[in-house]
Amino acid sequence: MDFLEKARVRLEHWLEHNEDHREEYEKFAELLEAEGKGETAAYVRETAELTARSTEALEKALETLKS
């Protein structure tokens, strides 16, 4: 497997991993809100949003790698 193929595999792995984390952050934020920790939940939601943005960047990286 050459370097570019390894890069593709790594980017795909990171994309999946990021999405898993984003989903966990959202669920955790809901639990925090249920416990009356709205401010904490807001920061966790911000983390979820930032993770979504990083996922978008990784998707673009993967697209450019393939072209």
Image (cartoon, grey):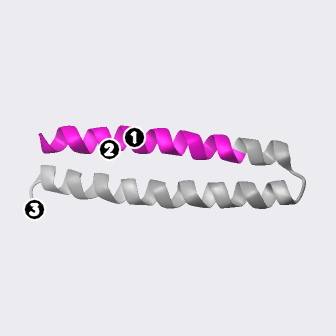
The residue identified by callout 1 is 56
Overall secondary structure of the magenta stretch? Answer: helix
Q: Is residue 44 left or right of residue 51?
A: right
Residues at badges 3 and 2 in contact (C-beta under 8 Å)?
no
Q: Position of residue 28 (x, y in %)?
A: 70, 59
Q: CA distance from mark 3 to mark 1?
A: 26 Å
Residues at badges 3 and 1 in contact (C-beta under 8 Å)?
no
Query: Tag 2: residue type?
Result: Glu
Of pointers 3 and 2, the one earlier in the residue sequence: 3
Tell which of 10 and 46 is nearer to you.
46
Residues at badges 1 and 2 in contact (C-beta under 8 Å)?
yes
The residue identified by callout 3 is 1
Q: Position of residue 62 (x, y in %)?
A: 25, 45
Quarter of the image with the N terminus is bottom left
Q: Position of residue 37 (x, y in %)?
A: 86, 51
Q: CA distance from mark 3 to mark 2?
A: 21 Å
Please check the rendered image and state whether residue 66 is part of the magenta-colored stretch, yes or no: yes
Locate residue 39: give its quadrant.
Answer: top right
Q: Position of residue 54 (x, y in %)?
A: 45, 40
At numbered mark 3, what does the secondary structure look like: helix, strand or loop?
loop
Of pointers 3 and 1, the one earlier in the residue sequence: 3
At numbered mark 1, what does the secondary structure look like: helix, strand or loop?
helix
Q: Who's the residue at 67% across and 45% down the image? A: 45
Q: Which residues are magenta?
A: 44-67
Q: Nearer the viewer, mark 3 or mark 2?
A: 2
Locate residue 33: give its quadrant.
Answer: bottom right
Q: Is residue 3 left or right of residue 23?
A: left
Please check the rendered image and state whether residue 53 is part of the magenta-colored stretch, yes or no: yes
Q: Which mark is residue 59?
A: 2
